[in-house]
Structure formats: C-alpha cells, structure tokens
Amino acid sequence: MKLAHGILAMLVTPFHDDYRLNEDALRREVQWAIAAGAHGVVAAPSIGEFLHMDEAERTRVFEIVIEETRKRPNLSAVAMTSGATTL
C-alpha cells in the first residue's frame, strides 16, 4: 500500500440543481486538481456534503475519483469518512 504524500486536494462534491451527483463535474474537478499540481485528491471530504449523501452516492463518488486518479501514475486517492456525532 502506498502512503499519500504531497499536496492532497479536498474536493467539493458537485451536484445538479435537483441534488443528483454531477458525475461529469466531479471528473473535471479531479482533473483540474491534478493539472494544478495536486499529488492526490480526497473524495467526499468532511466539507459538509458527506453526511448528507447516502451510501450509494458516497460509493459512486469514491469510484469516480479512483477511476480518474488511476489514469495517471503516482497519484493518491483518499476516501474520507465522517460521522455526525462524537461517539
């Protein structure tokens, strides 16, 4: 397992006006972060949207980010997890 290193961009998960995941915009965001010099990306970070997505949406976000980062060698993809309580 490779450890994440360098600059990791924390992505903001994009949605359509009807609250569906905007997969194309997410792919473009990953590509933009990498083109801007990020060594990896953090999918669904705890910026706020993670807690409001269901499991299927989170899984799809992780899949898309992994698909995009695997297109280029030596990039890290981190799947953020979070909880709404301190327990």
Image: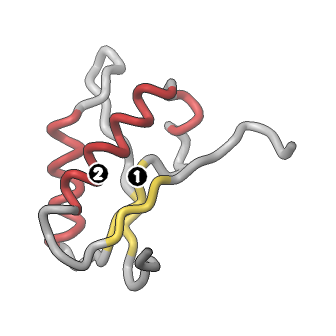
* Badge 2 element: helix
- Is residue 28 shown left or right of residue 43? left
The amino acid marked with disc number 1 is Ala
Q: Residue at x 41, y 36 (%)?
A: 59
Looking at the rendered image, the quarter that the C terminus falls into is: top right
Q: Residue furthest top?
A: 18
Tell me the tag on residue 65. 2
Q: Residue at x 17, y 75 (%)?
A: 73
Q: Are marks 2 and 1 in contact (CB under 8 Å)?
A: yes
Q: Is residue 63 left or right of residue 80?
A: left
Q: Residues within 10 Å of mark 2 (few under 14, many from 20)?
A: many
Q: Nearer the viewer, residue 67 or 1?
A: 1
Residue at 50% in and 24% down: 54
Vertical order, 33 against 45 (above or below): below
Mark 1 residue element:
strand
The Cα–Cα distance between marks 2 and 1, rounded to whole angstroms, is 6 Å
Disc 2 marks a residue whose amino acid type is Val
Residue with the mark numbered 1: 43
In the image, is residue 40 above or below residue 32? Answer: below
